Amino acid sequence: MFSLPDLPYPYNALEPVISDRTMHFHHDKHHATYVKTLNELLEKAGQSPATLEEVIRGASKTGDKKLFNNAAQAWNHSFFWAAMSPEHEQPQGDLDAAIKASFGDLAALKTAFVTEGVGHFGSGWVWLVADKSGALKIRSTHDADDTLTQDGLTPLLVCDLWEHAYYLDHQNDRKAFLEAWFDALPHWRFAGFQLAAAKGNGEPWRHPANGEGSDRKQVRAG
Ligand code: MN
């Protein structure tokens, strides 16, 4: 069984950008349902894979859309929680240098990130990713799709573009949500660890493995 990871901060910690009410619906209902369905599908198939990453890559290869969608949505949401922080951080060190090299400055990265998210039609995710050279890029993916199936890319941050992520707090104004999100919530220290992993220094974030409890610490000490 894959567990639903606990949030690494209180439900109200991301206010006012993401309300306590949204976090309860989003984590306790939406995310929980993906995890529950994932476990039901694996049980029905008599499978007990060790990691969620192998479920996602395997289902992508075999074209098992239902398994892929639930596994990837379970992973994407856990990564989304881990890549946010209530501490209003700023990018530091190598990450700050990579942002300047790839985008010019943080404001330009914000514009590119928000523009990609606003221009993305329908549900999905907007990502900041790094390639193996440490160059940063912005990607958006549809529905449950993620960057795990794209060779050579490591995700640093993600923001949820499904309406359930912002409708209670920002109604239809996805742009206002993305701008407020970018200013307040990226866990830049986490993104820095992911950038180092992209270049071969350390391991990237992994979802709690099959049978691993929900109490595993999601945010690494730095
Ligand atoms: Mn969501």
Image (tube, grey):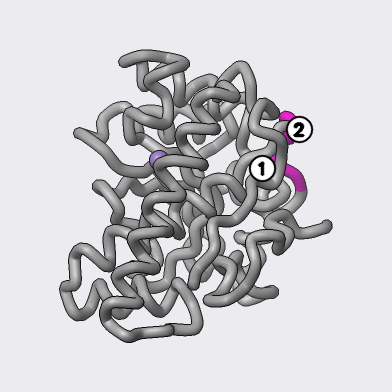
N-term-proximal mark, 2 vs 1: 2
Task: Tell whether 171 sits left or right of 15.
Answer: left
Q: Secondary structure at mark 1?
A: loop
Q: Is residue 215 magenta?
A: no
From where the camera sits, is residue 116 visible? Answer: no
Give the numbered dot on residue 129.
none
Q: Is residue 91 magenta?
A: yes
Splitting the image into 4 quarters, where does residue 125 fall? Answer: top left
Q: Secondary structure at mark 2?
A: loop
Q: Which residue is mark 2?
A: 87
Check whether the beta carbons of the residues at disc 2 and disc 1 lie within 8 A of each other. Answer: yes
In the image, the segment drawn in magenta is: 87-92
Q: Amino acid at mark 2?
A: Glu
Give the numbered dot on residue 187.
1
Q: Amino acid at mark 1?
A: His
Which residue lies at the image location 69% right of the left edge and 74% below the top edge?
202
Residue 51 vs residue 21, the one in the foreground: 21
User: Mark 1: few, some, or many residues within 10 Å (few <14, many ≥20)?
Assistant: many
Quadrant in the picture for the C terminus: bottom right
Which residue lies at the image location 64% right of the left edge and 74% below the top edge?
203
Q: Position of residue 122 (x, y in %)?
A: 21, 34
Splitting the image into 4 quarters, where does residue 123 fall? Answer: top left
Residue 102 vs residue 129, the one in the foreground: 129
Which quarter of the frame holds ligand 1? top left
Query: How many discs appear?
Result: 2
Which residue lies at the image location 49% right of the left edge and 83% below the top edge?
50
Task: Tell whether 131 sits left or right of 167.
Answer: right
Splitting the image into 4 quarters, where does residue 63 fall? Answer: bottom left
Q: Position of residue 188 (x, y in %)?
A: 67, 44
Q: CA distance from mark 2 to mark 1?
A: 8 Å
Q: Position of residue 100 (x, y in %)?
A: 60, 42
Q: Main secondary structure of the magenta part?
A: loop
